[in-house]
Amino acid sequence: MIRFQKKNLLYKIYIWLPILALFISVFNEFDLNYLKIDYFSFNFPFILIFYFALKEYQRFDYFLVFLAGLINDTVVGLPLGLSSLSYILICIFATYLRNITISPNLIKDWFYFLFIISLINSINYSVLFLFFSYELDITLFIVNNFFTFLFYIVFSIFFKRYLKSLDD
Amino acid sequence: MASSRDDFIIAIRSAFLKKSTKQKFSLLTLVFFSIFIIVLSNFNFKAIDITKSIIKEIVYRSSFIVSIPENFIKSTYYNLNEYTSYYKDYKTTKEELDQLKSENISTKIIKSENEELKSLIDGYTITSNKILAKVIVDHKSPFLKSIIINKGSKEKIKIGTNIYDRSYLVGRVIEVNYTNSRVLLLTDLNSNIPVSITPGNAQAIVVGNADRKGEVRYIKNDLINKIEDKGIAYTSGTGSIFKSGIPVGTIDFKDENGKILVNFYSDFTQLKYVFAEIDELIPTNVQTTENISTDDSSNTEQIKLNLISDELQILEDSNTKYLEENQELNTLTNELNKQIEILKAENDLQKNVIQKHDLDKEEYEFLRLNLIYSSKCQSKKLFSTGFKVGTPEYRKCIMQRGKIND
C-alpha cells in the first residue's frame, strides 16, 4: 500500500485529484468513445460533481466547479455559462439530498442522480433549442443520459475507494 | 405536517445559502452568476466580445496542451491500425494516384479556361489562397461537431471561410478569434450544404446527422429517382455559403429508414491539418487599366472576337462530323431495308409450304375415313339416303364420320 507523507507534492496532487480529473475531463471533453460506438457517450463531469458534492469533500470547491463549467462551454462551443449552471444545479441537488438523508444508500443516490441528470439535460435541451436555436438530436441526449446513469455506479465504487484511501 | 415543511425549507435554504469553511461562494451566488453570464454573452458589446475572445484564446491553448497525452495515445492506436493494412492501402493508393494524375491534367486545363472566362465576365478574379492550419482542439461533443484551428483573424480568416481536408470540404468557420477559430463540421446537425448530385444533376441540401454521415434533404420527389447509389455530391454554390464544385461525398442508399445518406470523403475524426481558403478580390488587367480604355477595349474586343471565331470553328467541325455520321447511317438503313425484303420473301415461301402441308394432311384424313364410312355415305337406288361419290355433300358426310343429317 502506498503511503503518502503529508506536505508531499504527490499527496497534494492526490487530495486535489477530483478537481484535477474534472478539469482534465472538461479540457478534453472525453467520453471514452474510442471504439466509435454509435450514439455512445456519457457525461463524466456530472458523475464526478454529483458524487463529491454529495459526500461533501472538503477540496471540492464550488467556484472551481463553476470555472470548469465555463471551460467546458468554451471547448464544446455551447453558450457561455450554460454548463456552469448545470454543474452548480447538480451541486445544489446533491447538497439537498445530503441534508435530507440520515443513512446514505447507494441505490437511492443512484436513482436520485438519474432524476437530476434527466432534469438538467432537459433544461439544457430546452434552453439551447428555444433560446439559442440549436438543432439538436434528442436521441443523443437520451442515450447520453442513460449511459451517464449506468456509469455512475461504476465510478462511485472507484470514488468510494479513493475517499477511503484518504481516510486511511 | 408543519414540521416536515420546515425541514424541507431548512434543507433547501441550507443547500442554497450555507457555505462550508472551504467554499468561497454560496451556490445561490454561483447560480445567479451563471445566469448573468448566459444573458451577458448574448449581447454584442465590444468589451464582452473581447473578454470572450481572451477566454477562448486561453482555453483553446490550454485544451491543446492538456489533450497532448490523450492525443498521443489515440494517434498511437490509429498508427498501429494503419500499419496492419499498410500494403493493401499502398496498392489501392497507387492505382488511385495514377488515375488522379491523368484527371489532374484535364482539371488544370478546365481551371485555366474557367479563370480566363471569369475575368472576362466580371473584371475581377477571385484568387484563392489556401493556408495550412493545425487542428488544436478536436474534442467533439456528442451534440456539437466542431474543431478549433490555429488560424484566426490575424491570417484574414472570416466567418464563413471554407475549410478543406486536401481538396475535400470539411466545414466552415463559425467563430473567429485573433489567433484561432472554430470550424463547424459538415456532420453537425446545424450544418446545411447546398449540393448538386451527379449523375442526374439533382439539387439538394445535405444536413449533418450528428454521426459520421450527412443526410440528403429538401429534394424534389421526381428527382429522387434520378439519384444513383455511389453518385457524387459536390457543392452547388447556392446561397454563397460554400464555393461551387467542391467534392463533398458519395451517395449511400444503404440506410434502413429509407433515407438517402452521404458518405463524406474526409474522415473528420482523423483531422490533424486542414486548409483554410482565403478569398481576395483582385482587379484584373481589364479593370485596373481602365484609363487607357481605347487600347484595352479593342484588346478585349479582339479576345472576344477570337473566342467567338473559335466557337464558330468548333461548331462547323461538329456540324461536318454530324453530316458524315448522317450519311453513314443512311447507307446502313438502306442495307437493312434490303435485308428485310429478303427475309419477307423467305417467310412467304415457308408459309406456302406449311399451307400445302396442311392440305395434304386433310386429304389423307379424308381417304382414311372414306375407307371406313363410304358405305354409309354412298347413295342407294331404293332408299336414297346417301350422296353421290365426289360431291361436296359426300365429302362432308365422310368427314363427319358417316353422319348424314347435321
Image (cartoon, rainbow, N blue to C red):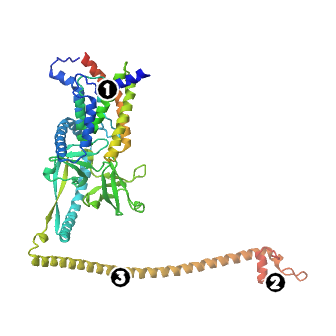
Q: Amino acid at mark 3?
A: Gln
Viewer-nearest residue: B53 or B224: B53
Considering the image in quadrants, where does the N terminus of chain B appear? top left
Q: Quarter of the image containing the C terminus of chain B?
A: bottom right
Location of mark 2 (residue): B388
Q: List the single residue furthest toward the left.
A: B292
The mark lying in front, picked from 3 and 2, is 3
Residue B270 vertical placement versus B250 (above, below): above
Instruction: Give me the chain letter of mark 3.
Output: B
Cα–Cα span, label 3 and label 1: 96 Å
What label does residue B327 carry, if any? 3
Query: Residue B139 lies in what quarter of the image?
Result: top left
Where's residue A50, x and y in %? 31, 28
Please tell me which of labels 3 and 2 falls first in the chain: 3
- Asked if both marks, 3 and 1, belong to the same chain, the answer given is yes
The reply to whether discs 1 and 2 touch (Cβ–Cβ < 8 Å) is: no
Q: Position of residue A124 (x, y in %)?
A: 33, 40
Question: How many C-alpha atoms fall within 10 Å of the one at disc 3: few (<14), some, or many (≥20)?
Answer: few
> Which residue is at 38% across, 23% downward?
B6
Q: What is the C-alpha distance between the residues marked 3 and 2?
A: 70 Å
Q: Quadrant of residue A126?
A: top left
At label 2, which amino acid type do we have? Answer: Lys
In this view, the mark in front (1 or 2): 1
